[in-house]
Structures are given as structure tokens and as C-alpha cells.
Amino acid sequence: MRNKKLMQGNQAVAEAALIAGVKVCAGYPITPSTETIEILARKLPSYGGRFIQMEDELASIGTIIGASAAGKKAITATSGPGFSLMQELLGYAAMVELPIVIYNAQRVGPSTGGATKPQQGDIMQSKWGSHGESPRIVIYPSSVRECFDMTIEAFNLAEKYMVPVVLFSDEILAHMRESVELPEAGEIKIINRRKDAKPQNKYLPYDIDESEIPVLPPLGEGYRYNISGMIHAENGIPNLAPDVIEACITRINSKLDKYYDDIVRVEQIKNDKAKIAVLAYGVVTRPARGAIEKAKKNGIEVELIRPITLWPFPEREIGEVAERVDKIIVVEMNLGQVAIMVRASVEGKAEVIQFNKICSRSITVDEIYNKIKEHV
């Protein structure tokens, strides 16, 4: 018999992290993500792991990077102000190619903003907040069950591609409670990082094979090698020769392009009769589905496209939608962060219409439906 639980989003993230094999959580309490670290603090010891409450968010992300270097799966949980503090070390994790998971339950910003109110204001920051060109994968669930599933996926992607992964929610989803039917243990796929390193006398940490993914043995388990946030050559030693700079930055970014089809996920409700598509992501997808159903009942045909993966951005899939429809309505709880990327993806093939709400109240079915009616 399947295991059914009434869970909130933050709890689903914590429970899934344990199943994924997390052994270290370091964090600093911040609303609306705190329940996640509270649960992990209580449960990790019985899973052979450890929770460490740090003095701030800089120390938190630094700790999980260190844990990852020692071969442990590691997570931190935060919200907007803390996520801002993590940006430099998020870039460091991307540069040294150590897998970590950062759970960001978004709230109203900027600055202290509104701790108990929802927003989707950290989308661009999740990709571009660090200086320089650095890769990361960003995913955003829309239900409590997806919080569970995508936490496991976040760890799998981080371990498989040796890259930091940002898992988003928001205040609504973080504290939403839903009845969740959890999968059986045998149905859950767990991926661990590669361990097929060459012998120590032939080993270079960034001597990459055709996979473009490094094999980094846990520090302290027989291998000695250099990890540096500076531009480095195959041996991990800082090297600022122009060809090394170009090769290093190109490779750490292009590896996600190479595996685009494996990484990028979207949900689509296609409709050959539709001339309008609604694009929504995260918790806003829920009223968007309702608005599309209401439109259909009133004789208006509408498509839905929902980016589940926000970075790498699903530009191919959105471009294909633009080939079929005349207008794409982008619904967001911000001032249009994803709309910028949608315009770049459609290349003028469809009109991009923004529907933005930042007052901290959830976007409703009727609001989206009325926006659809305006553009029929």
C-alpha cells in the first residue's frame, strides 16, 4: 500500500532530501523556508548525517560546498535575503564543479521585503546573481508532491552533472498542505556522482573525458588534488593563460548545453486550435490551468506551456509554441523576469504579453481568464 501523507512544501523538500541521500545540511533560519532545516536538524542524525546551524548564509553555503568536496550530498535552505548573500559562493561551486542543492522559498523583496508574503522575484538572480559566466540548473515545482519529486531530481542532476542546483518554491508553496501519495522506495531513482577516477599517479581533477564532467574523488579518501575558484587548468592549479581561460569557462557552461535534452523539462497542454498560449511556472501554474479550463468552457481555445526547468531556459520548446500561436501571455509574480527570456526565445514569431502581479496576493483564475479574454 502506498504511503499517503498530509505534507507542506517545506516538509516534502526535507523528506525527499533524506531519501536522496543528503548527509549534511547547513543553514540559518529564514522565513518562509525554516521548516525545512528544522525537520532536517531533527532527522538527519538517524540517517547518519548532520545538521549545522551557521552564523549566516555565507557560512551555510560554504559549509555545504566543503561537505560536497568530502563526497557528501549537501543542501541548504534559504529565502531572498539569504540567497543574495550566497551568490559569490554559488559561483564558486559552479567553477570548481562541486554538486550542491540550494532550496530557495521565495518571498517579497527587495531587501527584507515581506517575509510572510509570496513573490517570484529571484528568477533572474538564480542564473545571473553571481559575477562571471557560471552554470547552474534551476527547477521550480508547482505542488507539494512535485516539491518531493523535484528535490530528488535536484540531487540527481547535481550529482550527475557536477553542478549547483537551485530548487525554487515560494511562500505559498512552501506552506501549502496537500495530501501526497509518496512513491515506493523501489520507484525512486537515485543518482550518485561518478567514482571512476584514474589512479592517483595518472589523475588530474579536470582532465575531462568526452562526457565533459569531472570525476572528483572525496577529499580525504586517498586522493590529493587542488580545487581553486580561480581559472584553472586540468591539474586544478590557477592558470590565467588566455587559452586556458577560454577553455575553462566554455567547458563548465557548455556541458549543460550538451545535456539540454536530459536536463530541461516543460509541461505542455497543446491545442492545435489555439491562437493564444499561457506561460506560467511554479505555483502560478495552478490558477493558469484553471483559467485555461474556464476559457475552454466559454469557447476560447488556449495552450499552456510551463517551464519546470528555468535554467537552462527552455527556449526551443517556447520557440515551437511561438510557431503555433499568435500571442503568449506570460503570467508571473514579478515585473516580468521570465518574459524577457520568452521574448528572446520567440524571436518575434509571436506577441509576448505580460501579466504581472507583485502585491503579495496569489494570482487568481479569474484574473488570468480576464487577461485571456482581452486578447482574443
Image: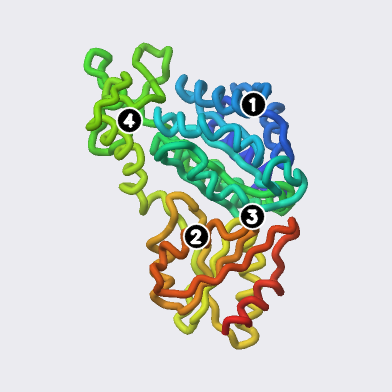
Task: Tell me residue 223's x, y (percent).
Answer: 35, 14
Numbered circle sitting on residue 340: 2
* Residue denoted by label 1: 44
Marked residue nearer the N-terminal end (1 or 4): 1
Tell me what residue is drawn at x 50 percent, y 59 percent: 307
Decide: few, some or many residues near mark 3? Use Cα within 10 Å; few <14, some 14-19, many ≥20: many
Tell me what residue is drawn at x 52 percent, y 41 percent: 129
* Residue denoted by label 4: 214
- Measure the C-alpha gap from mark 1 to mark 4: 28 Å
Q: What kind of residue is marked 3?
A: Ser
- Measure the C-alpha gap from mark 4 to mark 3: 34 Å
- Measure the C-alpha gap from mark 3 to mark 2: 25 Å
Q: In the picture, residue 236 is in which quadrant?
A: top left
Marked residue nearer the N-terminal end (1 or 3): 1
Q: Nearer the viewer, residue 25 or 62?
A: 62
Q: Is residue 52 visible?
A: yes
Q: Select label 1 or label 2 by which is in front.
A: 2
Marked residue nearer the N-terminal end (4 or 2): 4
* Residue denoted by label 3: 143
Decide: few, some or many residues near mark 2? Use Cα within 10 Å; few <14, some 14-19, many ≥20: few
Q: Nearer the viewer, residue 179 or 99?
A: 99
Q: What kind of residue is marked 2?
A: Ile
Q: Select label 4 or label 2 by which is in front.
A: 2
